Image (tube, helix red, strand yellow):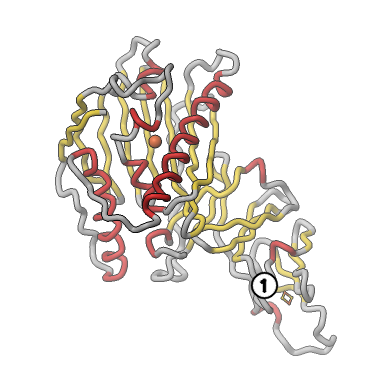
Amino acid sequence: MTSAMTLGFWYPIVLTRHLRRGTLTRQHVAGVPIVMGRDRRGAPFAFLDHCPHRGMPLSFARFDGGTLECAYHGWRFDAQTGTCQAIPSLPSDTTVSISKITATRVPAVDRDGHVWVYLADPLAPGAAPPPPPTLPVFSARHHLTHLAVDVGCGFDEAVISLLDPAHGPFVHRAWWWRKPRMMYDKSKVFEPIPDGFRIPPHEPSGNSAPYKVLRLYRYPKQTTIEFHLPSTRLEVTRCGPYWFSSRTVVIPIDANRCRLDFCAAWNMFRMVPLVSKVFRLFGGMFLRQDKRSLERLALGLAHGPSTMLLGDADTPARWYLQLRTAYLNARRSGEALKHPLEQPTRLRWRS
Ligand code: FES
Ligand SMILES: [Fe+2]
């Protein structure tokens, strides 16, 4: 699988602390095998996981912190540039200019506790990647946490579940959280942004996660929720000097697998012991609930049933599908993206 929609974007693939100096790891993004590593000076790097000679995965290479030595014939490649530095089988008087041979580099950076890689857009080869996304934070001192689950489902289904306001009461059930009967009428304005859409700053709903956490503070609360192509949901809540910021990214792994990667930063309850642990406990439970429901959904979709998008609760999903088509058309034609949301639009649903 290399869906055109997933190319031309950055993805957070491994945790910064898991990619140690002098180590290599094989990963898959959008069906593409990638070898990632960190050199002896601490800089991350990534390559397509095959040797330019005969295709041996470079993830089997011997790595000394500076060069990768292919496990098959010992060709050596610089870890940062990918330039070939040695071909042991060549006679000493060779005229082959080995520095013209390179392993295919994949841009990689550390950001917000992850190592991100950029999958190039084949329609814009050689174009410099845009800067990688950054989680908004509003004070130097804050908690930062990461959670992720791999899910056996298609990419679009996972993205649509990020945008689906109606599954909460039925998937994220817990006695301490809420029950289906605790559903309220919701009415929210959505507005277009260049690569997605957003709910502009508004008072969070009484049964939303940030509200429950922040209700102990008396300051007015404002939440902004954004969706950015290809698969990022960003939610920021401000409450006087306090704030909570979270990002969920659906990472395509292959045709039937993706990862829900969740990263959150906040500055409230910093003095309360175990706050990060408690947060991770609940966050992990939410992600596992989404995983279970998406994997059950995949069982249903395996038989190709006809499905429908109904009412305002399914409208963000409809916009996503329209937006990705518009994005692909714009990329192919070189023309401006024709955004499916022409103006701010109010949606009403119960959840
Ligand atoms: S396949 Fe890598 S050196 Fe031959
Ligand atoms: Fe969910």
- Label 1 CB, ligand 1: below 8 Å? yes
Expressed as whole percent of the image width and height from the top left, the position of residue 100 reads: 64, 79
Rendered position, 143 above or below 127: above
The count of marks equals 1
**Residue 95 placement (x, y as % from top left):** 75, 89
Placement of the C terminus among the 4 image quadrants: top left
Q: Residue at x 26, y 46 (%)?
A: 193
Nearer to us in this view, 25 or 102? 25
Which residue is pictured at 48% across the width and 35% down the height? Answer: 287
Question: Where does the image place residue 32, in percent across and percent down from the top left?
Answer: 54, 63
Q: Is residue 44 found left or right of 218 in the rendered image?
A: right
Query: Which residue in the structure is indicated by mark 1?
Result: 51
Q: Nearer the viewer, residue 52 or 44?
A: 52
Q: Is residue 234 above or below residue 120?
A: above
Instruction: Identify the residue at horizontal 60%, vertical 56% (top origin).
Output: 27
Quadrant of ligand 1: it is bottom right
